Image: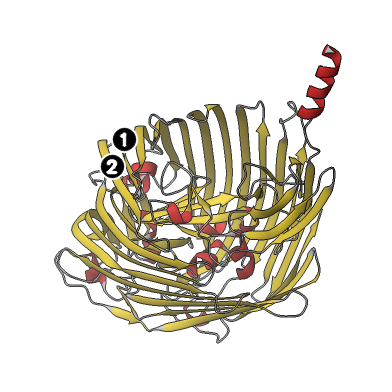
Amino acid sequence: MFGAFLLLASLLGAPAELGTLRGKVLFEDEQRPAVGASVVLLGTQIGSTVAANGEFTIPGIPEGNYDVRISYVGYRREDVRNIVIQSAAVTELNIVLRPSPFNLDAVVVTGTLNKHILKDAPVLTEVIGARELSVIGSKNLTEVLAAQTGIEVGTGIGQTQSASLHGLNDNHVLVLVDGERVSGKVDGAIDLGQVPISMVDRIEVVKGPLSSIYGSDALGGVVNILTKNPEGSEVAFSGTFGSLERTDLNLSGSHVLRSVFGPDGDVRAIANISYNRFGGVDYLKADNFMEMPGSNRLNLNLKVNGQITPHFSLDAKADHYRDELEWLAGDIGITFLRDFARNEKLTLTGIGTYVFSDALSLKLSANKSQNDRRSWETTGAGYLTRDSYGREVVQSYRLQGTLIPYARSILTMGAEYSDETMNSSRFSGGVRSVSNKVIYAEDEWDLGVGTLAIGGRYSVNSSFGAVFAPRISAVVPVTGHTSLRASYGRGYREPSLLELHIDFDHSSVGYILKGNPDLQPEDSHGFTISAQYNREDLVWFRITYFLNTLRNLIDYYAVQNSTPGSAAILSYRNVDRAVTEGVDVDVDLEPIEGALLSLGYSHVRAVDGNGYLLPFRTPNSLNLKLNGRLPVLDATVDLRMRWFDRKPINDDQVNRGIYTDGEAPQYSYVPAYQVSDVRVSARPMDRVELFAGVNNLFDTVRYPFGQIKPRQLYGGLNVTIR
């Protein structure tokens, strides 16, 4: 009797047979597995993520009809209705995710100390994603940034390609690679041509002071270049060839070693080699001066991610860069001069992260970057007139912890030590160095009606003492489609070692440059207010007002004007006050699926304390981008137009008075101009892309101070093997 009762109970309690949902998810634009995409049965707690092979399996689903949602950051969400799950059966579901026309769901890391979805980030951040990088097709980071609203690019005296933000100079813009400083400054700025596009996953740009997180140099903003992480096993090759001796070659490979340190202990690695050649541009042969130098650039990159235990991960990265540049440097009456420069840089980065729980993690990082630069000059007959060398070493060590003390708060705190050492033949005294000891914190609150982030950085500089840089930022969703942002931050820039100690005799062309050890740090207060509106995949709009007040700006001045038989002696000084303010407007539209129209307008007003215009700032600029798909061969067409208003300049070759205290500047102007680019690509096979294009379609030339590449035709291919 008792046995019969147990049998009956087991039969009554036996669970019904359950069904399984299985399938594959690919990215449409890349035709690769959508690793990490989310697959969820709506209205339930049942779901899974897509594995490295693009497949997913969800077992144990009760019989019935379900709506399934597949999503991934940066791609359109796909909802599949009325999927039938039957007992003891497998239901197949294959999905292709289409790219989102806007980047609202992109994860950003630059504006605060925590990761955010772009549309929810309290600090206004602009993202140039992998899709846009591939559409542009450029292998030059400067050309990519030039297409963005409110960013002005140029080529410096030392042939540095750099970017300016919101009317502030390139040495007020901090360039980071994976959040770390790198060596290689020329004229006070990092040469953007040193960074290989082939390793770039996305670029994040934050305009306005960000010294509360990154310290000195971030008065105008931050350009953070995020490199690719290996996601699977593949080999990729790309080759581009064009006029002006353009040659871009790249070979990269990635691989995943499964379960090296246990069931979840994968090791992922990516290696890259790229070579770029550019023949240079000489606008006016008669002056024996080449405005854009010829160059050969070589990059070697290795990045490894390892999950050592379920709680501990270790990342390591090594980058080697080498370039050679050559250009005509002018005419001294009896002969012309030819300049040469060579850079060789090695950067090593290691990051260890330990996650104690969902509420507590600790990260330790170390970064060292060394750049050796040699620069020399010869006469037309090959006689050596100048030969200088320099070694710059930048290193930092950081310990950072993140915890959740309250349900609606994320607190991040850290300590950092960094130093910079330069050994240059242009220095009096040879080796110079400076160090910083830092503590910083940021507390981010979810207020229910928005997010508020308050942070600050206390830094003690070995030469200039202590400084505190606070920042407060907030985002408030007004409606489901509209949000408002506001932020205030203090920025500062300590004088560079070159500005303090340089002793460079270039009297052969009329000047001697000497440093000023009495310089004081530059200081700024920046305010940003923006409103954003988005309507699903139809339209995205943003308008931003910015204001920066600056003190102790560092500029040239003449200690001694040139006289017959003697060269001018130039140095640096702190000038009183300056203001930059303006408006950025961005609009993205998708009038029909597969076509994206983008418009950008920027207005900048920049004046010094006497009300005089700050030179080399473009007051108005306009960007237009149109990208669309064609119905054959998965082809796309990308059109870009950039218009720049006339720009005031001070030409120190004809207006020596610009170095004199109290004298009103005499301006000349670069006329307004526009540059248009067009690129066409097609995929005759899934993993082969062919492309061709024309940069500067109408062959616009603006000289001097335009430094635009003339019309350039190019073509090439991208091949991926998985």
Alpha-carbon span between mark 1 and mark 2: 8 Å
* Residue 550, position as x, y percentages in the image: 23, 56
Q: Is residue 337 above or below residue 422?
A: below
Q: Is residue 109 above or below residue 558?
A: above
503 displayed left or right of 183:
left
Q: Nearer the viewer, residue 254 or 441?
A: 441
Where disc 2 sits, the SS reads strand
Q: Residue at image x 63%, y 64%?
A: 99
The disc at residue 371 is none
Q: Residue at image x 44%, y 44%?
A: 424
Q: Which residue is mark 1?
A: 459
Return the disc, 1 or 2, that comes first in the chain's sequence. 1
103 displayed left or right of 406:
right
Q: Quadrant of residue 720?
A: bottom right
Q: Which residue is mark 2?
A: 469
Find out whether the residues at labels 1 and 2 contact each other: C-beta distance under 8 Å.
yes
- The amino acid beneath tag 2 is Ala
- The amino acid beneath tag 1 is Ser
* Residue 170, position as x, y percentages in the image: 39, 59
